[in-house]
Amino acid sequence: MAPALGAWGAPGAQLAVVWSPLSFPSQDYYGKELQKLEDLKTNACVASARPLPKAVRDALERVHEEVVARYYGCGLVIPECLTSRRILDLGSGSGRDCYLLSQLVGEQGHVTGIDMTEGQVEVAKKHIPYHMDKFGYQKPNVEFLQGYMEKLGDAGLADESYDIVISNCVINLAPDKRAVLREAYRVLKPGGEMYFSDIYASQRLSKAVQKHRVLWGECLAGALYWKDLYSIAEEVGFSPPCLVTASPITISNKELEGIIGDCCFVSATFRLFKVPGSSRARPGQVIYNGGIVGHERELVFDANLTFKEGEVVDVDAEMAAILQSSRFAEEFLIRDGGANAATPQGCCHKQVKTAGIVAQRLRPRKQPGSRDGET
């Protein structure tokens, strides 16, 4: 079934695409056609934006081989400062990231995975006893639900019930991206974070690309024009997106290249924060205490901002509010003012640099035309 396509207009207009959940093309693609990583036809859903830290590599070695084999993510969605946190994984698939996070949050933390594909949820569920025994836990700290990330309430997920929401190369499969971000915002606690990797396009996609079944399953046909993420995040209520990493997607399949044309794709990781409305932070200075395990000497917060232990950093009001209201508050000394308050660092004042980073990763393979929406 082809999607009902809205007209291109304001930023994000392509998000008006509507599918019936029962006929959603990627459901069969991920549940039946893809049985292992090697079945993918592009590297879009397997590209890694950065090397895995040792702690994550060690944790991955303890994840069941079938769970790893059925993993189709596009980035690393393991944020910092996780001990005892409640985490929700949107589009958890076979559960690889959930079982990684299960180890990092500890037995007192909790991880919920939700996925629309029955076969993937079954794989994840059947390995719960194996992993709890492997981790030495007395009781499970993970659960897996079958459902839609646009309708988390239908799965019983309550308002303000999670510290962190993650997603790994799945939001591109959702026709209504606004609904996904709205639901993530709803279930996050004040100060909570959405930390997610996905595929983004250098322009708004043609109808031919959007209706291509294989390109849907390969994470490309539903890719969001990257600039639209900023307008959607603002509309939903999140802080300005902070780009963590970005890497280009390569496509070796000639048939798919012909359909895609001059559009380019990037795998990117962003972080969004639910800053409470009562937060009235001002530009100031922050000092990282160095207390986060695995990041004691420096915390690479995003592509623009790295905090080194004991170093004074001037930040804008937006970043000050994020640090004050989030789980990072105890890891920083935060004070008002600053010698360079006129040009502080932070997500909202670094969008020009961020745009340059993403645009460079989205450099066309051939000379682009004059289509609207190109970088």
Image: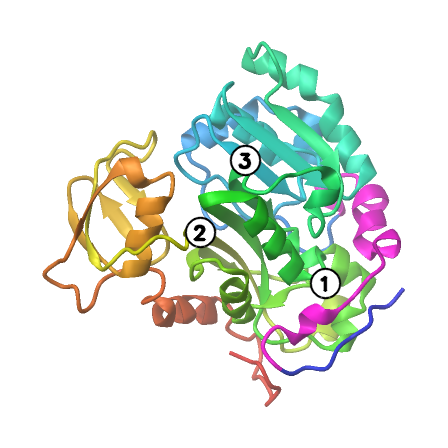
Residue under label 3: 87
What is the distance, in whole Å, between disc 2 and disc 3 at their CAs? Answer: 14 Å
Q: Is residue 305 visible?
A: no
Q: Which residues are magenta?
A: 10-39
Residue under label 1: 253
Tell me the mark number nearer the camera, choosing from 1 and 3: 3
Q: Is residue 102 left or right of residue 330?
A: right
Q: Quadrant of residue 128?
A: top right
Question: Badge 3, how many Cα within 10 Å: few under 14, some, many 20+?
Answer: many
What amino acid is found at the position of numbered circle 2 in the picture?
Answer: Phe
| Numbered badge on residue 273 | 2
Could you say where residue 294 lies in the image, as x and y percent from the top left?
Answer: 34, 31
Question: Badge 2, how many Cα within 10 Å: few under 14, some, many 20+?
Answer: many
Tell me the mark number nearer the camera, choosing from 2 and 1: 2
Could you say where residue 171 lies in the image, as x and y percent from the top left?
Answer: 64, 54
Label whose residue precedes the other's in the sequence (2 or 1): 1
What amino acid is found at the position of numbered circle 1 in the picture?
Answer: Asn
Question: Badge 1, how many Cα within 10 Å: few under 14, some, many 20+?
Answer: few
- Find numbered disc 3 in the image and state the secondary structure of the residue it sits on: strand
Residue furthest to the bottom in view is 370
Q: For the point 60% across and 61% down, which residue is it?
A: 250
Label whose residue precedes the other's in the sequence (1 or 3): 3
Report the number of numbered marks: 3
Label whose residue precedes the other's in the sequence (2 or 3): 3
